Amino acid sequence: MYRRSPVTKTDSIGRASAFLASGTIVSRILGFVKLIVLAGVIGQVGQSTNAFAVANQLPNTIYVIVAGGVLTAVLVPQIVRASLHADGGTAYINKLLTLALVILAATTVAATALAPVLTLLYGSNMKPESLALATAFAFWCLPQIFFYGLYTVLGEVLNARKSFGPFTWVPVLNNVVAIAGLLIFSGLYGADPNGARSATEFTPAMIAVLAGSATLGVVLQAVVLFYFWHRIGLRFRPDFRFRGVGLGVAGRMASWTFGMLLLTTLAGIVETRVVTLAGDSDASVAALNTAWLIFMLPHSVITVSVATAYFTRMSEHASVGKLALVRTDASSAIRGTTLIIMLASAVIAVCAYPFARVFVAPYDQVQSIGNVIIAYVLGLVAFCVLFVVQRTFYALGDTRTPFFFTLFQVVLVIAGVLACALLPSAWIAAGVALTVTVSGILQALLAAWLLRGRLGGIDGRRILRSLATYAVAAVPAILAGVLLLLALGGVREAGFALSGKLPAVLSMIVIGLAMSAVYFGLLLILRTAELRVFVDPLVARIRRR
């Protein structure tokens, strides 16, 4: 008689992880669709494009500074612990959520009232008409702060109650609404893919449709989570009796994280102010934002997923003083993530121009945005190594050391970015991106050295041997990719790969598949141990079937 195999805890965690990862992937894909539509509607260069880019990044920046660190480092852990109370933590959660909403509401009101000041802080080098448009956009965008925070708190409560899906999947709704808003804007006012529309051409109605639809997506992303609260039996009742919430100790622990956020924000302000010195037809704020999202795609899907799984294990081992196992986990996480990230870096660098062609059409814009993508992606491997090292410090309960190696990087970034102001305007954005890359590589080296001292070693020889092996396999893959890129006309204005969005996507697929075949084929020939970790279970499953 057939008997169903029992579902183990590992299996259920694996399925939950896969479900969460699928939500992240779908959301990221729709995010890129939104970015492509945005580029088709208002372009990637120009006065109005950069004005919207500056305004739309303000709520994210302020949320991360004021609320993001507090919610993540203080309130969220409290929510998780509160779920263990006899009442499931309902009373405690109501207090925490009320406190969070009060903080968020006060921050949102203050930031919106200060929209002209905040916009000037980032865009003082913009032309007066562009700055005025950015301020108008900011009034519509800054209310997003409150709803970003609401989404975070409601979602973390659901996660604590083992309802994982909504938190990951509702951003899909945000992207759908934003895309719909862009299409409505295009239908009402026409598309401007080359960014030729001046800032003075925007009417109040145009501003409301473009920025208002972006904010509406964030609002719905947060509010819809109340429905899922209702489904699992939670009800929110405001409770202003904050005594006993216990934020004192946790707040002190979060202070270093908060300081780190301030440092990175300062660097971001300097980057934005310098890059706005570029001409209206040059890559600027919007181009940097697009290139950074491309840079972050493999990191978000691969590094974050792998490192998050290892982070739990490292925290468990660190809590009982098993530093040797922490060292082993960190080494495994670095070697496992960089195996794929090395290939991703190579493919994105080779396909930078076709990638840029998906967003813009004029060849000079393709070149400028493609150069920014290349400048960023050169630091992707180091960025992922840094992410793992930073999480290892967090597992050890150390937020102080990451503050200091972040300070080191911020000093380098500010000095380098200010020097980029002396570059020709067409190269300022690429120079800023390259500065971020170089400083990030040096930061990763410093962080690894500090972690080595903390753990008494980080398995450095094994990590370097693996990275060297990946690099050896990447070189022939890059050569194959470049030959295909040249054959497909990926560096010529009239070439097939740059003749349209679809040819660009098809070219990237062909180049990516060819480079992957060469890369993984060489790693198999070299009998790379890290690759066998992925391949052996797959081969075993195929044989069983």
Image: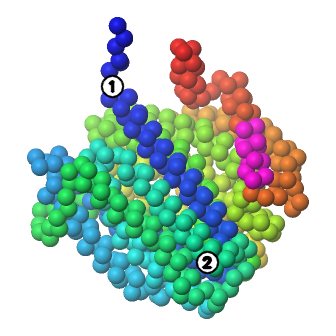
Q: Quadrant of the C terminus?
A: top right
First-in-chain label (1 vs 2): 1
Position of residue 3 relative to residue 524, above or below, is above
Per the rendering, the mark at residue 188 is: 2
* Within-10-Å neighbours for mark 1: few <14, some 14–19, many 20+: few
Q: Amino acid at mark 1?
A: Thr
Instruction: Work out whether residue 332 or residue 141 is closer to the camera in this orientation and state it.
Output: 141
Main secondary structure along the magenta-highlighted residues: helix
Q: Which residues are magenta?
A: 502-514
Position of residue 422 relative to residue 155, above or below, is below
Q: Quadrant of the N terminus?
A: top left
- Please provide percent x and percent y for residue 55: 52, 78
Q: Residue at 48% of width from left, 49% of height from top?
A: 24
Per the rendering, the mark at residue 469 is: none
What colour scheme was applied to this rendering of the protein?
rainbow
- Please provide percent x and percent y for residue 372: 70, 63
- Please provide percent x and percent y for residue 489: 87, 52
The answer to whether residue 107 is visible is yes
Q: Amino acid at mark 2?
A: Leu
Residue extending farthest to the front is: 187
SS state under label 1: loop
* Distance Cα–Cα, label 1 vs label 2: 54 Å
Residue extending farthest to the top is: 1
Q: Residue at 54% of width from left, 36% of height from top?
A: 336
- Please provide percent x and percent y for residue 432: 65, 68
Question: Of tags 1 and 2, which is closer to the observer?
Answer: 2
SS state under label 2: helix
Is residue 226 inside the magenta stretch?
no
Per the rendering, the mark at residue 8 is: 1
Instruction: Work out whether residue 144 or residue 307 is closer to the camera in this orientation and state it.
Output: 144
Q: Residue at 53% of width from left, 19% of height from top?
A: 541
